[in-house]
């Protein structure tokens, strides 16, 4: 009897344990199945983008990760004491958060895994993935610290991934040399996988490209391991490789590499772009006829596209800058705009077409001015137009050489010193900022300092050369004189009243300083301010008020746009002014107010004189009295 009960109890316990085990297996089986499905979606997504950091999971992939997190959380709730089961659940939850790009939650789960399950097999993966999540969460210093056990030994399964991440951290810390060293270590180690070496070559090429080391970048973009990478990375490597050659002015070789990309069937969507680059590089190589054949091919096979708009723009640019055929250039620019009006090249084409139209108009106007026989040409207006033409060439048409030619014409032939100074500085600035010729610019800046001292152009030339600014314009000199006069005025205002004779003398000295400043620099800002201070001095004495008013009138009439002219106008116009319309509205409102007051007053007196009505006593019923007595006014009904 006892033995039978024992066997039955044992079977019942075993059954319960079996059910528990089945529940765990059910949750984990579903979680792992969902993780595999999400991994397939993630792999397909990353194959279509060159950089994992630029791609995020779609809705279907995110939903699967959410279900994985849900399944794992149930395991943690139901089996908290089973270390193996909870370790697997925490790891899957952390991985799901990472793939969802929820970096803070992933970091928390990885930390939890290390705290409770540091002796489990997945700990090596956790060390790297936590460092990666810290990097993506922009916690670079902590990420570097977390990465130390990963890169400490080559035996770590994530050693090479760790070196790659270390290079990214070095790049973020603006240390490209250290990043390159970390990636070179990946390539130097013979135990690295070909895929990791391909990634290292790709990253190294990008770093060298940013550093404008075209030869080294081209070498790494063409490494044999690059072929192992996904399609998007291979395509990017091919395009950047060709651009390295283009930046190194090896135009025909770059065009040949783009031709190879054009032949790849997988890159069919980018064929119009490759054709445009082939045409542009062929044009840069001096083979103009071949380039135009390519551009026309694009315009025929891919009309009404951005590539067609870009082709027409290049053709217009050639006619404008090389052949100076502005009419034909404008026709090509119009075609560029029509081909794809919303594209960047259509916008640039419209700007250039308008600039060329203005250029032709101003050029013809100047030509007519020179050829006019009826009167003496207005050369000041002529050179002003020449300067405007130079601005068009530089800022709208990207022709710095033509702009310099126009500015040189102004410098050599104009008799107006202001125009010559302006053109001289503009020419030096073009060499400095647009042509990247600092030596020529330096010579021109020094010439400006020598020929036009004590001008704003000379001051700016000293600034651009990195020299200590020693030049002083009339404004600067007037400002220095004003500071001296102001200090004399301050001294006078701080003297004790008991020494009145000294006070009068001090104010007279300050007045003389302001007066001489205005006489020497009447059109400067400091000179105008000194005139205002003279009026203040006269206003201090009642017998000199007329002199103060006269000065205020001068400030108002001749310098009305300055702060002191505006202040003088206010002081002279002390009486309030009002227009006829404002006066009419004011009278109307007054009449309305009087009418309203009379009406209210009449109602008041009528009520006051009326016979008071008899008031009846209020009868309160017994029930009302009970309610009244039971109501507690300290509380409100709800």
Image (cartoon, rainbow, N blue to C red):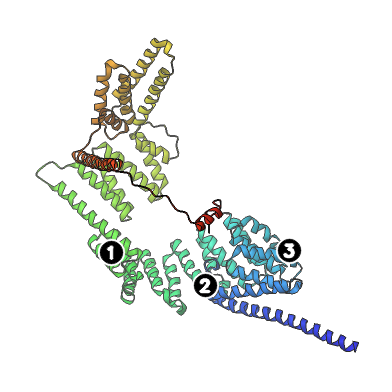
Classify the position of the N terminus by image quarter: bottom right
| Mark closer to the observer (3, 1) | 3
Indicate left or right for 256 with 363 as reference.
right
Q: Which callout, 1 or 2, points at the residue further toward the start of the chain?
A: 2
- Residue 78 image position (x, y, % from top left): 71, 74
Q: In this view, does 121 lie above or below 322?
A: below
| Alpha-carbon span between mark 3 and mark 1 | 67 Å
- Residue pointed to by mark 3: 115
Foreground pick, 633 / 354: 633
Q: Is mark 1 on a helix, strand or loop?
A: helix
Foreground pick, 134 / 32: 32
Q: In which quarter of the image is residue 10?
A: bottom right
- Residue 418 image position (x, y, % from top left): 27, 37
| Alpha-carbon span between mark 3 and mark 2 | 41 Å
- Residue pointed to by mark 1: 333
Q: In which quarter of the image is residue 37?
A: bottom right
């Amino acid at each position: 009897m006892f033995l039978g009960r024992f066997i039955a109890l044992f079977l019942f316990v075993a059954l319960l344990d079996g059910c528990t085990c089945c529940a765990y297996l059910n949750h984990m089986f579903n979680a792992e199945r969902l993780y595999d499905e999400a991994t397939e979606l993630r792999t397909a997504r990353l194959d279509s983008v060159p950089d994992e950091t630029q791609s995020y999971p779609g809705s279907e992939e995110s939903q699967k990760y959410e279900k994985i997190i849900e399944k794992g959380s149930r395991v943690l709730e139901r089996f908290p004491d089973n270390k193996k089961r909870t370790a697997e659940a925490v790891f899957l939850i952390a991985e799901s958060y990472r793939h969802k790009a929820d970096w803070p939650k992933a970091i928390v789960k990885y930390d939890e895994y290390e705290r409770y399950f540091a002796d489990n097999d997945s700990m090596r993966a956790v060390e790297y993935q936590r460092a990666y999540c810290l990097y993506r969460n922009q916690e670079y210093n902590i990420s570097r610290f977390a990465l130390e056990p990963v890169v400490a030994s080559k035996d770590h399964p994530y050693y090479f991934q760790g070196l790659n991440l270390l290079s990214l951290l070095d790049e973020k810390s603006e240390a490209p040399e250290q990043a390159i060293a970390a990636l070179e270590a990946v390539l130097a180690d013979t135990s690295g996988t070909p895929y990791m070496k391909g990634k290292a070559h790709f990253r190294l090429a990008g770093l060298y490209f940013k550093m404008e080391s075209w030869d080294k970048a081209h070498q790494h973009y063409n490494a044999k391991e690059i072929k192992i990478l996904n399609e998007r990375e291979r395509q990017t490597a091919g395009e950047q490789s060709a651009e390295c050659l283009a930046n190194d002015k090896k135009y025909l070789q770059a065009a040949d590499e783009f031709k190879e990309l054009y032949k790849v069937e997988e890159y069919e969507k980018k064929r119009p772009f490759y054709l445009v680059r082939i045409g542009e590089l062929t044009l840069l190589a001096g083979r103009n006829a071949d380039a135009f054949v390519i551009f026309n091919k694009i315009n025929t096979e891919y009309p009404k596209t951005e590539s067609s708009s870009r082709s027409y723009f290049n053709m217009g640019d050639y006619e404008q800058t090389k052949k100076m055929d502005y009419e034909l250039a404008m026709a090509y620019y119009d075609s560029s705009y029509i081909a794809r009006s919303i594209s960047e090249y259509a916008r640039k084409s419209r700007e250039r077409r308008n600039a060329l139209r203005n250029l032709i108009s101003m050029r013809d106007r100047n030509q007519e001015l020179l050829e006019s026989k009826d009167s003496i040409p207005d050369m000041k207006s002529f050179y002003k137009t020449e300067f405007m033409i130079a601005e068009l060439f530089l800022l709208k048409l990207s022709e710095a050489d033509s702009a310099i030619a126009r500015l040189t014409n102004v410098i050599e032939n104009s008799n107006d010193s202001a125009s010559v100074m302006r053109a001289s500085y503009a020419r030096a600035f073009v060499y400095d900022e647009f042509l990247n010729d600092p030596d020529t610019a330096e010579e021109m800046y020094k010439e400006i300092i020598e020929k036009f001292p004590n001008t704003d152009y000379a001051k700016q030339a000293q600034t651009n050369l990195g020299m200590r600014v020693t030049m002083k314009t009339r404004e600067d000199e007037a400002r220095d004189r004003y500071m001296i006069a102001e200090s004399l005025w301050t001294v006078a205002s701080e003297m004790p009243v008991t020494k009145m004779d000294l006070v009068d003398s001090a104010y007279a000295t300050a007045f003389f300083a302001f007066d001489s400043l205005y006489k020497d620099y009447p059109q400067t800002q400091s000179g105008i301010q000194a005139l205002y201070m003279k009026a203040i001095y006269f206003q201090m004495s009642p017998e000199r008020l007329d002199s103060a008013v006269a000065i205020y009138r001068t400030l108002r009439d001749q310098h009305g746009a300055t702060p002191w002219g505006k202040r003088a106008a206010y002081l002279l116009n002390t009486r309030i002014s009002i227009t006829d319309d404002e006066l009419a509205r004011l009278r109307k409102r007054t009449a309305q107010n009087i009418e309203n007051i009379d009406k209210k007053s009449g109602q008041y007196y009528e009520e006051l004189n009326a016979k008071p009505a008899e008031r009846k006593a209020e009868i309160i019923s017994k029930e009302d009295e009970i309610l009244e007595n039971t109501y507690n006014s300290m509380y409100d009904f709800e």
